[in-house]
């Protein structure tokens, strides 16, 4: 890896040794000279490096934290350790599509002035055409609204595996990321801070990565913590109208989209694929409360 890399694919991980290797196997055939891979091991019980075969290690820079600093802080650690202008923070259990990197590089070439390239999230409706925004209100509308109505607001909003961040424009806002790390989405706090200055964003599709089906219930998916965090993130949005639109989206669809899920507005198959079992159990309780 060289300091001239255009894009860093950073994978924050903890105790997902098998999943990380699977992700790397799907990713490494796509690598280009301008792309490097960074893996940040958040002090896993068994060092991640010991689980990755030599042929894959040759393509990856591995950094192991001496202590477990928590999942949100490890995302910020990726932003600090990368040395490229752009970063794709890929979930350790997400599956990159076969042409993901080429698509990212093309969008970077076409939209190098954007602070965010957003490729959608697993539950949201597919975007019919790309949208470029220049105001906080327009960006909030693109993120959380469809045809003027609030989109499904779920745990996958802010799904970082489908977001490419421009470090050259966002890293000076890392203070906001640490300040709001407890929300589980520090990168969203940094982005909301950037929207206040009118930095452009691209919203396009289809998705770059999809979550693999598993029943793991990691502590990071604590319903009450994330629900409170999404509300607290509104503090970062300085534009009053944009903040009101954001809060309206949360209020309308409900955190994790339980109102829309209970009204069967998404298929059971999609729901069971992307929502962890612990969250489905919580929503099932809401259904009968």
Image (spheres, grey):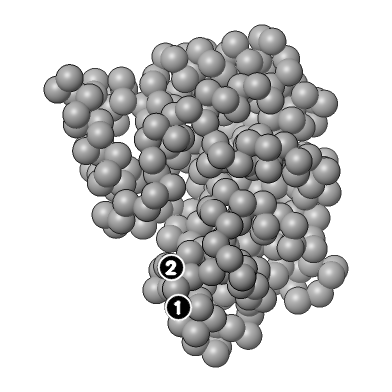
Q: Residue at x 44, y 35 (%)?
A: 225
Does 81 appear above or below 120?
Answer: below
Residue 133 in sight in this render? no
Q: Specify the label residue 159 is tagged with.
A: none
Image quarter of the N terminus: bottom right
The location of residue 241, given as percent across then percent down, is: 66, 9
Q: Which residue is mark 1?
A: 46
Circles 2 and 1, Cβ within 8 Å, touching? The answer is yes
How busy is the neighbourhood of tag 2: few (under 14 within 10 Å), some, or many (20 plus)?
A: some
- What secondary structure is found at the residue carrying circle 1? loop
Displayed quadrant of residue 256: top left
Whichever of labels 2 and 1 marks the residue nearer the N terminus, that label is: 2
The residue under the point 39% across, 32% down is: 224
Q: Is residue 59 visible?
A: yes
> Residue extending furthest left?
288
The residue tagged 2 is 15
Quarter in which the C terminus is drawn: top left
């Amino acid at each position: 890896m060289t300091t001239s890399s255009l894009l860093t694919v950073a994978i924050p991980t903890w105790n997902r040794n098998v999943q990380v290797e699977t992700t790397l196997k799907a990713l490494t055939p796509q690598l280009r000279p301008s792309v490097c891979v960074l893996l940040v091991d958040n002090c896993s019980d068994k060092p991640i490096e010991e689980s990755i075969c030599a042929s894959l290690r040759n393509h990856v820079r591995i950094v192991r934290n001496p202590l477990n600093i928590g999942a949100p802080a490890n995302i910020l650690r990726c932003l600090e350790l990368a040395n490229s202008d752009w970063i794709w923070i890929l979930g350790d259990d997400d599956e990159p599509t076969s042409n993901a990197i080429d698509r990212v590089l093309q969008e970077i070439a076409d939209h190098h002035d954007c602070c965010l390239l957003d490729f959608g999230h697993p539950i949201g409706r597919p975007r019919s055409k790309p949208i470029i925004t220049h105001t906080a209100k327009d960006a909030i509308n693109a993120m959380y609204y469809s045809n003027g109505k609030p989109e499904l607001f779920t745990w996958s909003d802010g799904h970082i595996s489908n977001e490419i961040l421009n470090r050259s424009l966002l890293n000076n806002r890392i203070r906001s990321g640490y300040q709001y790390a407890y929300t589980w989405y520090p990168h969203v706090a940094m982005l909301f801070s950037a929207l206040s200055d009118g930095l452009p964003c691209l919203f396009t599709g289809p998705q770059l990565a999809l979550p693999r089906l598993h029943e793991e219930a990691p502590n990071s998916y604590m319903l009450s913590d994330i629900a409170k965090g999404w509300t607290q993130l509104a503090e970062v949005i300085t534009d009053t109208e944009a903040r009101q639109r954001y809060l309206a989206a949360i209020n309308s669809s409900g955190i994790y989209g339980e109102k829309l899920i209970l009204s069967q507005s998404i298929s059971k198959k999609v729901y069971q694929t992307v929502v962890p079992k612990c969250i489905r159990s919580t929503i099932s309780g809401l259904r009968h409360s």
